[in-house]
Amino acid sequence: RKRVVSGVQPTGSIHLGNYLGAIKNWVALQDTYETLFFIVDLHAITLPYDTKELRKATRDTAALYLACGVDVSKASVFVQSHVRAHVDLMWLLSSSTPIGWLQKMTQFKEKSRKEGGENAAVALLTYPVLMSADILLYQADCVPVGEDQKQHLELARDLAQRVNNIYGGRKWKKLGGRGGSIFKIPEPLIPQAGARVMSLTDGLSKMSKSAPSDQSRINLLDSKDLIADKIKRCKTDSFAGLEFDNAERPECNNLLSVYQIVSGKTKEEVSEECKDMSWGTFKPLLADALIEHLSPIQVRYQEITAETGYLDKVLSEGADRATEIADATVHNLKQAMGFYPRN
Ligand code: AQP
């Protein structure tokens, strides 16, 4: 079976965007692919963060993976920092990564500017090398990527190719290896359209964990009252009726799309149902649909976190499985790079 890897950063509360854009798709993939889903805590420290929050966010994120339907009898779920090979491989890869490749990354340019340029952490620059390691360690065939991660996946592919060319093939064989490629070249797996969820306060920005206002997102663990309140106060417009795909109405398109996904209806059904509605009629409908969709996830989250030791056991088993695959990759690369083995 083909292998898929993916992860979410524990940088805050998991929100509807993370769920509809990533985790929900993983659940659909786990029957077809061999899957590894991790909580990418090593990535979460590239921007200043709260040390008191990291543990809780890591645990919550893991529990939410399971609550959303990731099935640990099919998928390996683990914490990135529990598998040391991620950092090992990152260092080995960084020796083959031209600085220019990293400096031209759009996300680096944007985020480092916000962090004051020269004062931004080196980790912000080298983030795509760690992400490449996350993928290449597991010889992943496919990686689900949103628009904003496409460039990083492209870099991972280029880097894999480059390392294969420099160290793989006959040279590796002469050093006692199997020869051939060290890394598989991962392909992007583009999720279905409509999965990009926008902010509740600005239909042109994506819903994000790090947006300062909590009002801008629906967190998966928000209470019923809070969800209803956030929807009641979310940004709308003053056009008559409701419609998809009007560029002048980004909020309207976003809210209808969310309604469509959580209600399980088709776009045509939603268009027809809502075309003459006012915001006053639609908002409670959306709030109810969201609450109904998220309630079972919240119930499962409570069950998972209430069972002492359960989550830690899942994460430990996931890390064992991941370590087995990851260590083999690091072993191969170290051999191909000419390191003296420990005997
Ligand atoms: N608004 C969104 N709509 C659809 N998908 C989204 N994702 C994030 N926001 C949306 C997807 O969630 C996964 C995890 O993302 P991440 O934790 O690696 O960081 P991110 O993409 O930067 O997500 P956030 O929530 O916006 O976090 P911050 O604010 O910390 O940067 C990815 O698959 C992403 O596509």
Image: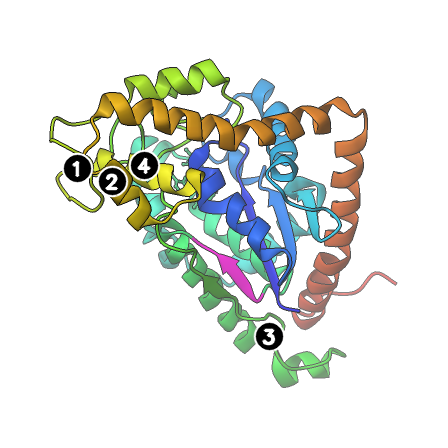
Q: Which residue is mark 1?
A: 249
Residue found at the very far bottom of the displayed protein:
170
> Which residues, given as a range, are shown in magenta?
141-145
Say whether marks 1 and 3 touch (CB < 8 Å): no
Q: Nearer the viewer, mark 4 or mark 2?
A: 2
Say whether marks 4 and 2 touch (CB < 8 Å): no
- Mark nearer the N terminus (3 vs 4): 3
Q: Quadrant of residue 237?
A: top left
Tell me which residue sits at (49%, 39%) in the image: 19
Residue 204 in view (yes/no): no
| Main secondary structure type of the part rendered in magenta | strand
- Mark nearer the N terminus (1 vs 3): 3
Is residue 100 depicted above or below 217 in this figure?
below
Label 2: which secondary element? helix
Q: Nearer the viewer, residue 324 or 69?
A: 69
Mark 4, ligand 1, within 8 Å: the answer is yes
User: Gap in Å between the C-alphas at discs 1 and 2?
Assistant: 6 Å
Q: Nearer the viewer, residue 9 or 71?
A: 71
Q: Quadrant of residue 182?
A: bottom right
User: Gap in Å between the C-alphas at discs 4 and 1?
Assistant: 12 Å
Q: Which mark is residue 262?
A: none
User: Gap in Å between the C-alphas at discs 1 and 3?
Assistant: 52 Å
Which amino acid does the dot numbered 4 rest on?
Met
Q: Residues within 10 Å of mark 1 (few under 14, many from 20)?
A: some
Label 1: which secondary element? loop
Say whether marks 4 and 1 touch (CB < 8 Å): no
Q: Which residue is mark 2?
A: 253
